[in-house]
Image (cartoon, helix red, strand yellow):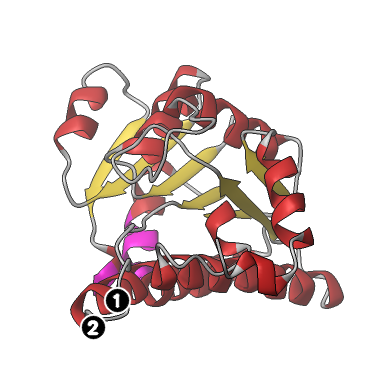
Amino acid sequence: MANYLIVGASSGIGLAVTRELLNQGHKVCGLGRSLEALHLLQQQHKNLFVLSYDIQTLQSQPIIAEAEKHMGPIDVVFLNSGVASGHSLDDWNDAARTVHTNVTGTTEFLINANAYFKQKNSEGVIAVNTSVAGLRGLRQAPVYSASKAYLINLCQSLRSQNKTSAGKVRVVDIRPGFVDTQMAGGTTWMSSTDKAAKQIIAAIHKRKEIVYISKRWILVAGLMRLVPRALYERF
């Protein structure tokens, strides 16, 4: 059994992953801004520890230490916090919220999680919730898709660094398509959060580096890459 730190555990995919991990017998420290759902889950699972955290505060170092104090050495960090705003290039406040959460906050946490595992000389895992939306620019969500493209490249860069420096930290790039959450932007091939959670956990345990949720989105990803730019930009 492993110790998981879930960032953004209070709803959607994060809550479903937390629930599934607990059902499998793992220990979980769930972080979130709204903790009502986590506290309800905590009443049923003694292996769940709950901490209030907003990724925009950029204070991951002390929260990682606090999580370790509650459940012992951390094995997996799942960076799931994100917002689905950034649908307009005419609203800087909307864009800034997306960048500060999806890019700045996630990067700060990832850097400190990687440092934590390196200091422990531990074969830890950092899993990041990116998105199929990050594969190419989306006119319907330009800043959001750009933020997810950044995370995809960040995962690849860190993975490459760790491989070439004999690092032990594994990096898992999780690319959901449409999952039935408040953030979902469509209904095509919609997966339930429970299905997504099972596939995410299985990918981590099977030592996958990139995983699409669900697997049918591998086809979409391939088609997105093949469409010529001139044609793609007319969609």
Q: Residues within 10 Å of mark 1 (few under 14, many from 20)?
A: many
Q: Which mark is residue 154?
A: none
217 or 118, nearer to the observer: 217
**Callout 2 touching callout 1 (CB < 8 Å):** yes
Q: Which residues are magenta?
A: 56-66
Residue 169 appearing in the image: yes
Measuring from the top left, give residue 23's x and y in whole percent.
46, 17
At 20% from the left edge and 31% from the top edge, which residue is drawn?
37
At 58% from the left edge and 53% from the top edge, which residue is drawn?
132
Q: Quadrant of the N terminus?
A: top right
**Residue topped by disc 1:** 95
Residue 227, placed above or below residue 220: below
Q: Secondary structure beneath disc 1? A: helix
Q: CA distance from mark 2 to mark 1?
A: 5 Å
Answer with the quarter of the image where residue 104 lies.
Answer: bottom left
**Residue topped by disc 2:** 92
At 26% from the left edge and 71% from the top edge, which residue is drawn?
56
55 or 141, nearer to the observer: 141
Was residue 59 drawn as part of the magenta stretch in this picture? yes
Measuring from the top left, give residue 65's x and y in whole percent.
38, 61
Residue 130 appearing in the image: no
Magenta segment, principal secondary structure?
helix
User: What amino acid is at disc 1?
Assistant: Ala
Measuring from the top left, give residue 171's x and y in whole percent.
67, 58
